[in-house]
Amino acid sequence: MKYTACGAINCSISYTIFLALYVVAGFHYAPAAGVGYCAGMVNSFILNRTFTFKATGALPPMLARFALVTGLGITFNVLVLHGLVTAVRLSPAVAQIFALMSSGSVNFAANKLWTFRPLGVGSGHREPVESADLFGTTPDHSPRTPRAS
């Protein structure tokens, strides 16, 4: 439900900017869609990191993963948009609605499973080992008692 609310806000931002560039400013529909998509994705990162997934990992790697997912999402969005405009003969303004919905589904899956996943899950990341652990002692440097088998 949270992702749907964030997605609706992001799509509204994307679509509004798309319409402003395509209808008002006269841009070709493909770059207008790309710029609108990027604007929605800035909002998406902020809302999804803090509200939907409550991600707490390091910002730079998370932002890099998000940028990659967004790049793939833009590509998918523009391909769907172009296909609907050229093959189905929908107007770009209508086709973009369907393109945003389809790319939003792909983005959700990628962001949930990869971008905003909890640290360590599926990443090969391990929590740091204290140096004392390497030598069989506890953090206060007393000898570790063997566990009963």
Image (cartoon, grey):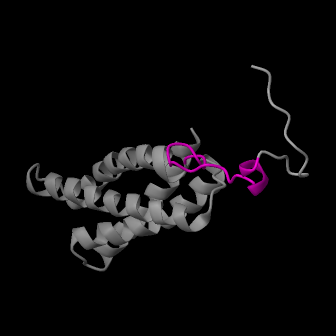
Q: Is there any visible trace of residue 78 in the rendered image?
A: yes
User: Is 149 located above or below residue 98 in the figure?
Assistant: above
Report the quarter where the C terminus lies.
Answer: top right
Q: Nearer the viewer, residue 56 or 142?
A: 142
Q: Residue 83: percent from the left, percent from the top? A: 14, 54
Give the residues drawn in magenta, as a range. 117-135
Does the magenta stretch mainly form a helix, a strand or a loop?
A: loop
Q: Residue 111: percent from the left, percent from the top? A: 47, 50
Which quadrant of the view contains residue 85?
Answer: bottom left
Outermost residue on the bottom side: it is 25
Residue occupying image coordinates x 29% and y 52%: 99
Residue occupying image coordinates x 22% and y 56%: 81
Q: Residue 43: percent from the left, percent from the top? A: 54, 63
Asked if residue 67 lies left or right of residue 19, the reply is right
Asked if residue 13 lies left or right of residue 98, the reply is right
Q: Is there any visible trace of residue 15 in the rendered image?
A: no
Q: Is 106 inside the magenta-drawn segment?
A: no
Residue occupying image coordinates x 55% and y 47%: 117
Residue occupying image coordinates x 48% and y 57%: 10
User: Is 54 located above or below residue 20 in the figure?
Assistant: above
